[in-house]
Image: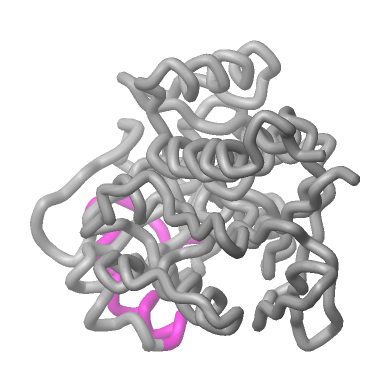
Amino acid sequence: MTKRVAIIGAGMAGLAAARLLREAGAACTVFDKSRGLGGRMATRRTGDFSFDHGAQYFTARGPRFRALVDGWRAAGHAAPWYDEAIVGAPGMTAPARAMAAGLETVMGFEVKRLSRDARGWSLHAGEGSYEGFATVIVATPAPQTTPLIESGGLSFPELASARYAPCLALMLAFDGAVAFQGESLRREDGPIAWIARNSSKPGRAEGPKTFVVHAAPDWSRTHLDETPEAILQKLAPVALELIGAQSAPIFATAHRWRYALVEQALSAPCLWDPKVGVGACGDYCLGPRVEAAFDSGEAMARAVLDTWGEHGPA
C-alpha cells in the first residue's frame, strides 16, 4: 500500500516537501487553514485591485531552486522584476499554484490536534478529521507548529529558539498622480521599512497605481494588536508622503502578518522524528528567504525518504 503523507501548511516549504514526496510515489495531501495557496507568498484581490501584500519577491541562487524557477518563468508563472528580484505572475501566488498542480489539497481546514492509533496519524479540526497517515509534516510558523506537535504527544525543543518579526502591511491604490516612479524603496529608519510599487511588477493588470507598504519590525511590534483602522490612521500619512501622492487613495486597507520575517533561524534544515513519522520544516529552519523555505521543505522530504529506505513509499 502506498504510504500516505499529510502536509500541514500550503506555503513554499510544505509544497516543496509534497512535490518531492509525490515524485517518489507517496500519496500526499496538503492542508491549510486559509482559502489560498502560498502562505506568505500571498496576493490579495479586492474588486479591481491586486496586491502582493506578503513576500514581495524572491531570488534563486541554489541549483535546485533555480531550475524550478526557470521552469516557472518558461511557463509564465514568474518573471524578473528588477536586479535579482523575481516575482510570481500575475501574482505572487502563481508559483504555489504551479507547485500544487496534481496534489490533493484541503483548503480552509485548520488542524487543531494530532492523534495516533493503529491506523496511523489523524488530523482533527472543529469540522471533522482526516485519518490514516503514515507521516505528518508540519510546515507552519514555529509558534503554530509547537502546539500541533505537542498535541500528538511529541516535542521538538529546537522550535523554541526560532524568532520572528511581525509586519503590518498597507495596501493602497491611487488614480491620481504620484511622485514615486521606482519599483521599490527600502528605509532603515522611521515606521516604514519597505514600499513597493506593486503595479510596476510584470504581468499586473493595467489600471490604478497600487502600492504595498511594510511597517518596520519595531513599529509593527508596538502596534500589532491594533485595529486595521487604527493602523491605517497612523501609518498612511507617512506612506502618502513617501509615495508623493497628490490625492487620497481610492482604496486603502491594512493586514497583520504576525509571523512575517525570521530573525533567528535554527540553522538546521528540518526537524524529524523517524520513530513516529512526524517532522517540521519552514523558513525558520534556514533563514528569511523564499528559497530557504524551499530548501527546508526538500530537506524534510529527503529525511522522510531516507527513513523509508530503498523500498520507497510503498
Location of residue 305 (image quadrant): top right
Is 80 drawn above or below residue 232 in the view shown?
above
Nearer to me, 300 or 174: 300
46 part of magenta stretch: no
Q: Is residue 270 left or right of residue 22?
A: left
Q: Is residue 176 left or right of residue 120?
A: left
In this orientation, does residue 145 appear?
yes
Q: Position of residue 50 (x, y in %)?
A: 61, 49
Is 244 drawn above or below residue 218 in the view shown?
above
Q: Is residue 185 left or right of residue 48?
A: left
242 part of magenta stretch: yes
Main secondary structure of the magenta stretch: helix
Q: Position of residue 26 (x, y in %)?
A: 78, 40
Location of residue 225 (image quadrant): bottom left
> Which residue range is magenta in the image?
227-250
Nearer to me, 231 or 15: 15
